[in-house]
Image (cartoon, helix red, strand yellow):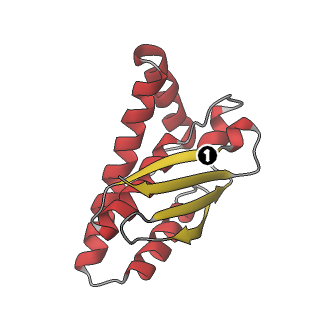
Amino acid sequence: MLIRPETVVEIQKVTEELFGRQSAAEILFRSGYKGTSLTTTKLLQQGMSAEEIIDSMFRMGGELGWGVFELLELGAEEGGRFKVAVSNSPFAGVYGPSAVPVCHLLRGAIAGIFSTLFQRKFNCDEVMCSARGEERCLFVGTVL
């Protein structure tokens, strides 16, 4: 099933209007997290390596039209972190100009991959967002 980014962003904007920006961010984060966590679990059960899973999930994200994913850093050990850049986020593009990052679904999806893969809870922050006029979106995850 494919859903247009315009539909996702409309859900986001209506949720922001009805429940506030923070609640909307949390709902989208959890939704993205759940989806990738389920897929990552399935790939682990199939015996794929961490590297293969990351490559597969990032490729799948691109095929879904969610942007171009690039792993910039990975330190999965305790206290580790990850950095993922996403170019051409359709969510930022459709959302339009914003003073704050808006790619909450991507943020949750990325956190879900790494948390499930390494069996550690990762926090994930969007520190750059193309909706703020930055060249791409940048997500930084740290172990909670």
Task: Give the residue drawn at x 26%, y 70%.
Answer: 42
Task: Give the residue drawn at x 22%, y 77%.
Answer: 45
Vertical order, 66 against 29 (above or below): below
Vertical order, 33 against 18 (above or below): below
Disc tally is 1
**In this view of the protein, can residue 1 be seen by the observer?**
no
Q: Which residue is mark 1?
A: 127
Q: Position of residue 119 (x, y in %)?
A: 27, 66
Q: Identify the secondary structure beneath mark 1.
A: strand
**In this view of the protein, can residue 53 be seen by the observer?**
yes
Vertical order, 16 against 70 (above or below): above
Query: In the visual, does 12 lie left or right of 129?
Result: left
Q: Position of residue 3 (x, y in %)?
A: 47, 45
Q: Position of residue 84 (x, y in %)?
A: 57, 61
> Hey, which residue is sitting farthest front in the picture?
79
The answer to which of 125 and 101 lies nearer the viewer is 125
Query: In the visual, does 79 lie left or right of 47?
Result: right
Amino acid type at image mark 1: Val
The answer to which of 134 and 83 lies nearer the viewer is 83
Task: Give the residue drawn at x 31%, y 75%.
Answer: 43
Task: Give the residue drawn at x 52%, y 24%.
Answer: 13
Q: Position of residue 25 (x, y in %)?
A: 45, 33
> Hey, which residue is sitting farthest top in the picture?
18
